[in-house]
Image: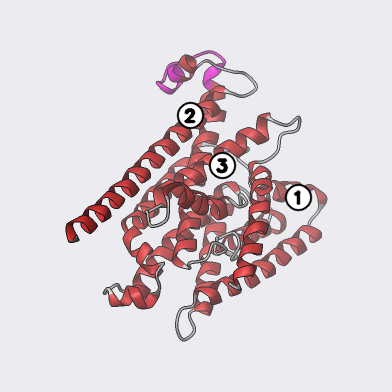
Amino acid sequence: MIKSKNSIITQGYKQRKNRLIGVTILLAALTLCLCTMMLIYGNTKYPLDVVIKVLSGENVKGATFAIETLRLPRMLCALLVGMAFGIAGNTFQTMLRNPLASPDIIGVTSGSSVAAVFCILMLGMSGPSVSIIAVISGLIIAALIYLLSNDVSFSGSRLILIGIGIQAMLQAVISFLLLKATQYDVSGALRWLSGSLNGMTMKSVPSLFVVVVVFGTIIVLLTKYLQVLELGDEFATTLGIRVNLVRVILVLSAVFLIAFATATTGPIAFVAFLAGPIASKLVGKGSPNVIPSALVGALLVLASDMIGQFVFSTRFPVGVITGILGAPYMLFLLICVNKRGEV
C-alpha cells in the first residue's frame, strides 16, 4: 500500500516536471520565432539567409543598416524588457499571494515614471540621465512602500493597499506635470509613458542584459524559497527560512528588474500583471514558473510590438497593445477577487 502511494506521488512529480519542461521548451521556441520575425519584417522584408549573413558580420547593402541598427536593438530590448517585467511581476504576485500584486498596480512602475516625466518636462533632460534617475526613483518608491507596509509585522495586503494608494498619488503628479508642460514637450513624455520600443539603440542593451541576467538568476536560485513564502510566513519560519532576509532580496531583485525595464522603454502596461498568471496556468500549480513567466513576458512584448507595427493602418506603441490585452483581464480578476472577499 505504501509503495503504491509512493509510486503515485513519484508519477505525479514526473508528470509535473515533464509538463514544466515541455511548456518551457515550447515558450522558448515561440520566443525565438518571434525574435526572428522581428528581424525579417519591417518596411522591407529580408529573407532569413540575409538576416543570418548580417548577424554573422557580413555587410549586405541596404540590409545591414536596417537589421543591425534598427531591428536588432528593438528586438533585444523587447526580449529583455519582457523577461524583466515577467519575472518581477511573478515574484511580487507569488510572494504576496495575490494576483493584483503586480509592480504596475502597486506603484513601483509609477515611481520610475514620475521621475522620468519630471526630468523630460521640467528639466529638459533626455537619454541615459533620465534612465538613471528613473531607476533611482523606482527604488526609492519601492523602499517607501515596503517600509510603510512593514509596521509591526509584514503584511502583503497592507503592502498592496499602500501601493495602490501611492500609485494613485503618483499618477496624479504625472497628470499635473503634463498639464503644466508645453504642448511640444508633452508629446515626448506621452510617448515614453505609453511604453514604446521606438528609438531603441544597442547602447541600452548591455546594462539591461546584465540586470536581467544577474537579478533574474538570483530570483531563479531563490525559487524554492519563493514557493514556500507563498504558503505563509509561519510555515516558512517553521521550515527554518529567514523570511525577512529572503523577502528583502526578492523585493530588491524584482524592483531592480522593473526599474531598469521601465527606464528603458517606459511602463509597458500589464506585462508584469499578465505574465505570471498565464505561465502558472500553462505549467500548472505547484511548479516553479519563474522562467516560464520570463518567456511569457517576452512573448507578450514581442507579439504586441509586431501587432502595433503591422496589423493596423496606424502604428501604435507596444504599451497601447498590451494595455488593450490586459485591461479586460484586470476587470475580470477584480470581479473574482471581490466575490471571494479578498484585497
Q: Which mark is residue 301?
A: 3
Q: Secondary structure at mark 2?
A: helix
Q: What segment carries the magenta color?
A: 52-64
Residue drawn at 46 percent across, 43 percent down: 295
Q: Do the numbered discs 3 and 2 sit on residues whose CB atoms are within 8 Å?
A: no
Residue lying farthest to the left in this orientation:
3
Q: Quadrant of the C terminus?
A: bottom right
- Mark in the foreground, 2 or 1: 2
Q: Is residue 295 left or right of residue 312?
A: left
**CA–CA distance between discs 3 and 2?**
13 Å
Residue drawn at 56 percent across, 71 percent down: 160
Residue drawn at 32 percent across, 46 percent down: 15
In the rendered image, which residue does mark 1 sit on? 185
Q: Quadrant of the N terminus?
A: bottom left
Q: Is residue 84 visible?
A: no
The amino acid beneath tag 1 is: Asp
Q: Earlier in the sequence, mark 2 or mark 1?
A: 2
Q: Earlier in the sequence, mark 1 or mark 3?
A: 1
Circle 3: is it few (<14), some (14-19), or many (20+) Cα within 10 Å? Answer: many
Q: Which mark is residue 117?
A: none
In the rendered image, which residue does mark 2 sit on? 33
**CA–CA distance between discs 2 and 1?**
37 Å
Circle 1: is it few (<14), some (14-19), or many (20+) Cα within 10 Å? Answer: some
- The foreground one among 228 and 57 is 228
**CA–CA distance between discs 1 and 3?**
26 Å
Q: Secondary structure at mark 1?
A: helix
- Mark in the foreground, 1 or 3: 3
**Relative to residue 23, is residue 185 depicted above or below?**
below
